Image (cartoon, rainbow, N blue to C red):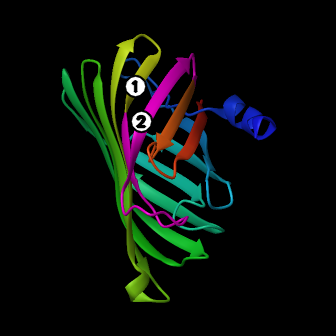
Amino acid sequence: MTARLLPVLLLASARVAAQEPAGAAQQASYAASASFYFLEDDEDYLQPTVALDRDWLHVEARYSYEDRDTASAWIGINLAAGDALSLEFTPMLGVVAGGTKGIAPGFRGTLSWRSLALYSEAEYVFDADDSSESFLYSWSELTLAPAEHWRIGIVAQRTRVYETDFDIQRGLLLGASFSRLDVTAYVLNPDESPTVVLAAAAGF
């Protein structure tokens, strides 16, 4: 398992926000991330995501998020409000193809106050082949940054990409930032059938 972790650790999970001087032309920012799932009773898998943001426009592509061997493409609108208590919110619409096919409205957003942050992303996939297979996917994190470059918190996930005994999986997370690189380790269901996730990304 150690050999398989190395490329994931080199990728790591990160978000980079581009800051522009007042009146300057808006620059595009890019992000590439990967989450490696280590499953106790199923085959391990990698879930990569790439994204582009330019002003209000958000474009994103995911693989193995909604289902194994399934890709999705997204377009959304970036919205932001607040200062001390800030909200970043992106409603999106996606097309899903592969093992699962359909249309998926969704969102991603972060609510921040001082060293606290609540991040959530969710989507509802309307299955084109069988409406009874339509499903809600979600991932949420509540984190505290006790020191610069570090964060701890709790996480909850609802997925059908792999079999689980729980409708909603819950767990703990520990993250560290290194310049434009941020590494996060998650343990879901730590007391029973634990799932370990290493998330990794780089922003440009």
Mark whose residue sits in front, 2 or 1? 2
Placement of the C terminus among the 4 image quadrants:
top right
Q: Nearer the viewer, residue 160 or 112?
A: 160
Q: Which residue is depicted at the point 68% across and 31% down? A: 9
**Horizontal and vertical percent position of residue 134:** 39, 78
How busy is the neighbourhood of tag 2: few (under 14 within 10 Å), some, or many (20 plus)?
some
Placement of the N terminus among the 4 image quadrants:
top right
Q: Which residue is depicted at the point 45% across and 65% down? A: 94
Is there any visible trace of residue 28 in the rendered image?
no
**Residue for badge 2:** 172
**Residue for badge 1:** 152
User: Are dots 2 and 1 in contact, CB under 8 Å?
Assistant: yes
**204 left or right of 164 in image:** right
**Horizontal and vertical percent position of residue 114:** 24, 18
In reply to whether residue 169 is colored magenta, the answer given is yes
When the figure is inspected, residue 143 is found, relative to residue 71, above or below; the finding is above
Q: Secondary structure at mark 1?
A: strand
**Horizontal and vertical percent position of residue 185:** 54, 33
Q: Which mark is on residue 29?
A: none
Q: Nearer the viewer, residue 193 or 125?
A: 193
Residue furthest right as drawn: 3
Name the quadrant containing residue 165.
bottom left
Q: Nearer the viewer, residue 58 or 37?
A: 37
Q: Which residue is depicted at the point 49% across and 26% down? A: 175
Q: CA distance from mark 2 to mark 1?
A: 8 Å
Decide which of tag 2 and tag 1 comes sooner along the chain: 1
Is there any visible trace of residue 75 in the rendered image?
yes
**Horizontal and vertical percent position of residue 159:** 45, 62
Name the quadrant containing residue 143.
top left
Q: Which contiguous range is marked in magenta?
A: 154-181
**79 left or right of 37 in image:** left
Q: Secondary structure at mark 2?
A: strand
